[in-house]
Amino acid sequence: MSNIKEIQSTCAYCGAGCQIRFSVDTAQNKILEAAPAKGRTNEGTLCLKGWYGWDYLNDPQILTKRLKKPMIRKRGKGSPLEEVEWAEAISYVADRFTEIKNTYGPDSIMGTGSARGAGNEANYIMQKFMRACIGTNNVDHCARI
Ligand code: SF4
């Protein structure tokens, strides 16, 4: 008897709600592959994230270990990341933004909202920050891919 089961679900990556069909190895509790299902919003198609962006479900540490503290490359590009306190990280980012903005202008900076995890309020604050503090309309969202 096969342990492979087809399970239809909703893609969890962005908010479009595409229907997705997972092949799941129930013995190992592992997703093997994904394919589009005929949903109202996706009509039998998926974007790349739907096709391939679900591997974190099998292993949440697959890309990187979860960050627990902010990190800075203090000795420049290529140097190792070092853990720092939030106050130092925020001050570092503020200084770099100011430096870049003063040298290249506000339109040299862009903010991208995240469909995953940040939430509507955080994305709203981010776009407000880009417009009001940085002074650019360069604001977009990862779903545009
Ligand atoms: S657009 Fe892509 S990421 Fe968003 S729900 Fe559909 S397949 Fe998933």
Image (cartoon, rainbow, N blue to C red):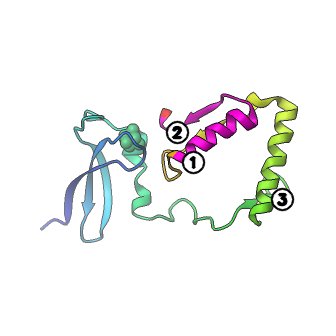
* Marks 2 and 1, how far apart at CA: 14 Å
Question: Label 3: few (<14), some or many (≥20) within 10 Å?
Answer: some
Q: Is mark 1 within 8 Å of ligand 1?
A: no
Callout 1 amino acid: Ala
Callout 3 amino acid: Lys
Residue matched to label 2: 142
Residue 47 drawn at (x, y percent): 39, 37
Callout 2 amino acid: Cys
Residue matched to label 1: 122
Badge 2 vs badge 1, beta-carbon distance below 8 Å: no
Q: Earlier in the sequence, mark 2 or mark 3?
A: 3
* Marks 2 and 3, how far apart at CA: 28 Å
**Magenta residue check for 66:** no
- Picture quarter with ligand 1: top left
> As rendered, which of 123 and 47 lies closer to the eye?
123
Can residue 142 be seen by looking at this rendering? yes
- Give the magenta-colored segment's residue range: 121-143
Q: Nearer the viewer, mark 2 or mark 3?
A: 2
Compared to residue 133, the image places residue 86 above or below, namely below
Residue matched to label 3: 74
Residue 18 drawn at (x, y percent): 32, 41
Residue at (24, 38) in percent of width and height: 39
